[in-house]
Image (tube, rainbow, N blue to C red):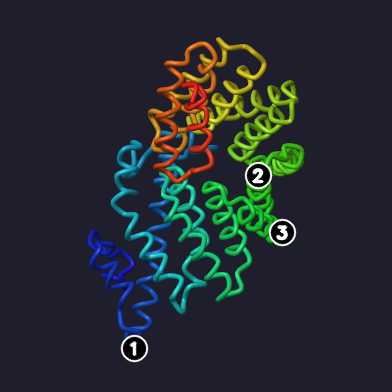
């Protein structure tokens, strides 16, 4: 079954996966073992691409009717939940394989890491980043090193370990630039901008994010451009420049609408709520805050829902404190659940302030 070009319905059953991963490496078995593992990776990459198209549509994928086994998001999420332990085990075996450089490990991890962020699997994401670094050190693969550092940087940023996040984001940016990988460099710059923002340096964040937006635009990467425009709007707002913030948030929202991406629309709408709150347009801030919360309710990311709850709590704390207290406590609980202790502390502090503690 492993050696056949059309192996049939049982070829990638868990038992066959285990066989492909654990076949004794005797000379007689080595060729079959290598082929089985290579076929397994190609199978998983194709499945991850289909799941990604269903859960994270962008570009052409966003405007096409879904086909294949994942015609709805629920089916894709169920597959990912069932398959995740096997995917992580496949990655572990792949990195340890003598044939690791022929398996497409970087492509596998590029798809996997996006889905892990979406579904709040931060520990698995850390393992994914560490596996890429290990693979890059064993095989001298700088593309894997760039992606691995970016993945680890995002994990450290999520957990509030900002010095480590900055170190990994900088390393990823430098490697991607040396490789001529504009998308990789733009992603690393976007991450680095977010780190600088979390460190309280909005001007440094703006410089990184402007460069990232320009790179994404130069290669027509609309999803990256949309998301980074929204992040840039947030940093302009923190820098006390609401007019520039509004311009970039509208640009991010326009691109998100073009892509029909609920997740990208969510980011722009949530940050537009923050902008309107800052400039005193409370009704618009509440309207956008509630819309962001509605969008997050239909998506798998608890982290995004927590951000929406926090934003609505911040908007309502002035005149509707009783409502704000509930939103802020719910945000606190969710941030704690997904390991974002930096935002959890903020939500708790705002909650206590509303109660007069």
Can residue 312 be seen in the rendering of this structure? no
| Mark 1 and mark 3: Cα distance apart in space | 41 Å
| Mark 3 and mark 2: Cα distance apart in space | 13 Å
Residue linked to disc 1: 26
| Neighbour tally class for label 1: few under 14, some 14-19, many 20 plus, Cα within 10 Å | few
The residue shown at (58%, 38%) is: 223
The residue shown at (39%, 37%) is: 300
Q: Earlier in the sequence, mark 1 or mark 3?
A: 1
Q: Is residue 44 above or below residue 60?
A: below
| Mark 2 and mark 1: Cα distance apart in space | 47 Å
Q: Is residue 247 left or right of residue 332?
A: right
Q: Nearer the viewer, residue 292 or 256?
A: 292
Q: Earlier in the sequence, mark 2 or mark 1?
A: 1
Label annotation for residue 190: 2
Can residue 44 be seen in the rendering of this structure? yes
Label annotation for residue 12: none
Residue mark closest to the camera, 1 vs 3:
3
Q: Quadrant of residue 65?
A: top left
Residue mark closest to the camera, 2 vs 1:
2
Q: Nearer the viewer, residue 314 or 140?
A: 314
Residue linked to disc 3: 174
Rendered location of residue 28, percent (x, y): 32, 88
Q: Is residue 92 above or below residue 306?
A: below
Q: Residue furthest front?
A: 357
The residue shown at (70%, 43%) is: 212
Q: Nearer the viewer, residue 346 or 100?
A: 346
Q: Do labels 1 and 3 touch, CB within 8 Å? A: no
Image quadrant where one finds the N terminus: bottom left
């Amino acid at each position: 079954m492993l050696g056949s070009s059309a192996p049939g319905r049982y070829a990638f059953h868990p038992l066959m996966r285990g066989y492909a991963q654990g076949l004794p490496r005797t000379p007689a078995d080595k060729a079959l073992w290598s082929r089985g593992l290579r076929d397994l990776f190609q199978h998983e990459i194709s499945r991850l691409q289909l799941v990604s198209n269903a859960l994270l549509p962008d570009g052409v994928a966003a405007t096409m009717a879904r086909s294949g086994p994942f015609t709805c998001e629920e089916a894709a999420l169920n597959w990912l939940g069932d398959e995740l332990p096997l995917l992580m085990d496949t990655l572990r075996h792949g990195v340890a394989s003598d044939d690791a450089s022929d398996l497409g490990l970087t492509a596998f991890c590029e798809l996997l890491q996006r889905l892990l962020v979406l579904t709040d699997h931060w520990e698995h994401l850390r393992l994914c980043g560490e596996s890429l670094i290990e693979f890059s050190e064993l095989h001298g693969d700088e593309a894997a090193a760039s992606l691995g550092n970016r993945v680890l940087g995002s994990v450290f940023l999520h957990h509030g370990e900002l010095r480590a996040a900055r170190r990994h984001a900088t390393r990823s940016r430098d490697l991607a630039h040396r490789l001529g990988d504009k998308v990789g460099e733009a992603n690393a710059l976007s991450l680095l901008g977010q780190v600088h923002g979390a460190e309280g340096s909005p001007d440094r964040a703006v410089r990184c994010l402007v460069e990232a937006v320009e790179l994404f635009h130069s290669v027509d990467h609309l999803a990256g451009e949309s998301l980074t425009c929204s992040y840039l709007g947030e940093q302009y707002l923190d820098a006390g420049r609401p007019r520039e913030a509004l311009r970039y948030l509208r640009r991010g929202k326009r691109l998100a609408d073009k892509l029909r991406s609920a997740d990208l629309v969510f980011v722009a709408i949530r940050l537009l709520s923050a902008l309107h709150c800052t400039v005193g347009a409370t009704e618009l801030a509440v309207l956008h805050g509630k819309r962001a919360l509605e969008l997050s309710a239909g998506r798998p990311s608890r982290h995004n829902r927590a951000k929406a709850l926090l934003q609505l709590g911040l908007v309502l704390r002035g005149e509707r404190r009783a409502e704000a207290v509930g939103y802020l406590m719910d945000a606190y609980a969710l941030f704690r659940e997904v390991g974002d202790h930096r935002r959890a502390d903020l939500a708790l502090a705002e909650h206590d302030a509303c109660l007069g503690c």
